[in-house]
Structure formats: structure tokens, C-alpha cells
Image (cartoon, grey):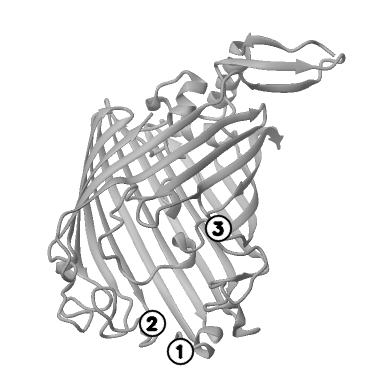
Amino acid sequence: MQPLHLRRNALSALGGVAVLLALGASPARAIPSFARQTKLPCSACHTQFPELNAFGRIFKLNGYTLRMIETIESADTSGHQELSINLMPLPSVMVQASETFTRRPQGATTNGTVLLPDQLSVFLAGAITPKIGAFIQVTYDPQSGTIGLDNTSIRFATPLTLASKPGIFGLSLNNNPTVQDVWNSTPAWGFPYVSSAVAPTPAAATLVDGGLAQQVAGLSAYVFWDDAIYGEVGAYRWAPQGAPALPDSTVFGLVEGVAPYWRLALTRSFGDNYLEVGTYGMTALRQPGSFTLGNARDRYTDIAFDFQYQRPLGNNDLTITGTWIHETRSLTASVAGGFAALTSGSLNTFRARATFHVGQSHAFSVGPFFTTGTSDSLLYAAGPIGGSRTGSPNSSGVIAQLDWNLWMNARISLQYTAYTKFNGASSDYDGSGRNASDNNTVYAVLWLMF
């Protein structure tokens, strides 16, 4: 066995760059760990963080393994590599501070809520081996005062050749459906990238749209072939934080068995234009109440479609994305437990946004959204601020956002959310005299990554 030694992994890294370019690279949440590992600025992988460009998508699909820094390496007598790790660990820190104003204060509370931190996260990210990399986020929640595992994906990736065309085969072990995705059109990395933790939000959301985030563990396999076709299949199991590993009467929202997940995307570059169109979704059995309800389960099936269009305009960039999610529900357990009035229903969500990036310094975004679905007087019950007088989940509005990047890793954002409908109505939606426009929100946030 050869002795441990240090060396600069330049040849390997340059070879990795060549592979990426060969696969069509022409900028995960942007974190300095990756910049330190690759010795590339944030703009190499992002239009503006966290939106990925072609190079950033290939970097993520290859398991975050491209390196330009010193490594500790070891090989056996036959030359087989037994160890290749970064010389130094590459943690990063994210801090957000914010202030939130709603058009009408929530109850008797004072308007203008300040959070410092709004969010505080530590990231452990980068290459683990030449074919395994990780994105691990640990977050402190100031409202609950707890620390927990946030978005996490551990990836294995290796090149492949299929029908004489290059590709990538990979595996992702993750805790949030769509967090492994490389397009900014799916829920985990979709717009808005930040939002107020204290402003009222609509009551209804589909399961794949954050409903299982950090409550499950999933393993998926993916192939990206000929820089044109992406396919992924996987499955998720119940694995919540802050709950017993073996369910008991304190457990709520149990996911039963295996929840399948799928993803298919087609991509094409023509001239300076890049287009992705795809579909994704999952199905799951879930218990709405505590484990003591017995064998009754609700079934959720989510089928979604998405697209992403990007085009450079000189030193600037235009990005347009959208997603539509259709969820069908069989709520047998919810009806048995008194949580719902109807045994079947559906929910539809649509979001789109257009962002104009002014170099790396500014970005202007506009994003309409709406949710429609089956009315249910128990599932969407009346109640101050968060309730629905009509029992309807229907909500709609638009988000406008201005981003000012003082540096690539320091941003000030000003976001305005305007509602035309909230939880089923435009006026007196909650049965307590609150209008949808009363929840219009101004959200100012300072976002630092270091």
C-alpha cells in the first residue's frame, strides 16, 4: 500500500471539467462550500443563487464531486484508489434576518415582526469520495427554539455510455421529495426561495409540495442521458424528526409503507435558448391523526408537470419557470377520525415566475399562483386568520420580488405578496371579517452565505 500523501488534485479536477463540458455545460442552494472546493465563483454554477445554470446542474448531477483543492489520497499496490478526501472539511453558514409587515395586523399583535435570525443554517457539503458527495443542512428554528436536519441529499454518481451517447447514472438518499432535482421549477428549490415565517399562508397544499419535507427518507436512482433525457424513480419511507422511531399514540401524519416517486424531464438547447419540460409525482398512504386510529389510511396521488426556460441576454439572463400539480385524495381515514367531511377530493396548484437577472447584481421576479380544490367544511374549517368560512381551499395572488446582491454571497431582498383570494373568498374569508388583501405581505430579508 502506498503511504498517505497530499497532492493538488488539478489534473483530476480539469478532467472533471472536461466531462461536464462534454455533457453540454456552456451557474442545490448556493453555498460557499462548493465554491471553496471547486475554486470557482458562485456565478460558475448560478445565474444568481440558488438558481442553477447548465454547469451547476451537471455539477449537482455528478454528486458535487468536482474538486480543485488539495486532497488526502491513498491507493493499494495495484493502483486502486482507496481514499480521496478534501484536506480540510468545507462547512458553510447561512444567516437570514428579516422584517414582515402585513396589510392588517394579525389579531392584537403588533405589525412589523423582526426575526434575528429568521433562519440560521450550517451546511456540510462537498465531495466525500470521487463518486460520492453530500449536501447536508442543519437549521436552527428561532420560533420553536430547536435544531434539526433540514434539506439533505447524499449522492452517488458515475459516468455511463448508452447507445454510444454519454450520460450520468446516480443515486440520491434524501429527506424531501424534489430536493434532489436540478431544475428550479419543482417545489424544493422553486420560487420564492425565501418567504416569511410569520405571515399568514393559505391552508391547502399538495403532498409533494413540501408536505413530506424532513418527515421521510428516500432513495432514488436517476439517469441523465445525452444531455437531453432525465429519468428518476425512487421510494420514500416514514422517518420524521422529533418523533419515536416506532409509532405510538403520539405520532401524527404517519406515512404507511413505501411512497413511490417518479421524475421525467426532456431538455433541449437551441441557440442561446434552454428549455426543460417534465413531469414528476408520487403516491402515498397516510394516517391523518394519531397512530391509535387503527388501520384506516388516506391515499394521496400527486401528478405534476413543470417547465423551465433560460436565455442569456448579453451580461443578463431571463428565466421563466412554472409547475402545475394535481392531487387526488381518498380520505377514508380522515372521515373516520372526524378531520374531513368527504371521502374523496382533489387539489390543484399552479405557480409560475419570470426573473430578469441584471448581471450578478440585481434580479426582478414576478410570480402568479393559484390553488383550487374540493370544498370540505371540516378539512378547511372556519377560524380567525387561518380558517375558511366557505370550506374552500381556493387561493390566488402574485409575488413580486427585488433582489440586490451586494456581493455574490450577500443579498437584500424585498418581496411583496398580494392575494386576490385566500382560503376560498376575497372578503371575510375566515368568518371573522378578515379579507384576502389583509394578508398582503411585505417581507424584507438580509441573506448572508459564508
Q: Are marks 1 and 3 in contact (CB under 8 Å)?
A: no
Between the C-alphas of marks 3 and 2, the distance is 31 Å
Which residue type does callout 2 highlight?
A: Thr
Q: Residue at x 49, y 30 (%)?
A: 91
Q: Which structural element holds mark 3?
A: loop
* Upstream in sequence: badge 2 or badge 1: 1
* Upstream in sequence: badge 1 or badge 3: 3
Instruction: Report which residue position mark 1 lands on.
Output: 342
Q: Which mark is residue 374?
A: 2
Question: Looking at the picture, how far across and down is residue 435, in whole percent?
Answer: 15, 74
Question: Looking at the picture, how far across and down is residue 160, in whole percent?
Answer: 70, 34
State the image quarter where residue 16 is shown. Answer: top right
Q: Which mark is residue 304?
A: none
Q: Residue furthest front?
A: 145
Q: Which structural element holds mark 2?
A: loop
Q: Is residue 435 visible?
A: yes
Question: Looking at the picture, how far across and down is residue 20, in whole percent?
Answer: 55, 26
Which residue type does callout 1 highlight?
A: Leu
State the image quarter where residue 23 is shown. Answer: top right
Q: Determine crowd level at label 1: few under 14, some 14-19, many 20+ residues with C-alpha closer than 10 A.
A: some
Between the C-alphas of marks 2 and 1, the distance is 9 Å
Q: Which mark is residue 241?
A: 3
In the depicted structure, whether residue 72 falls above or below residue 278 = above
Q: Nearer the viewer, mark 2 or mark 1?
A: 1
Q: Is residue 359 visible?
A: no
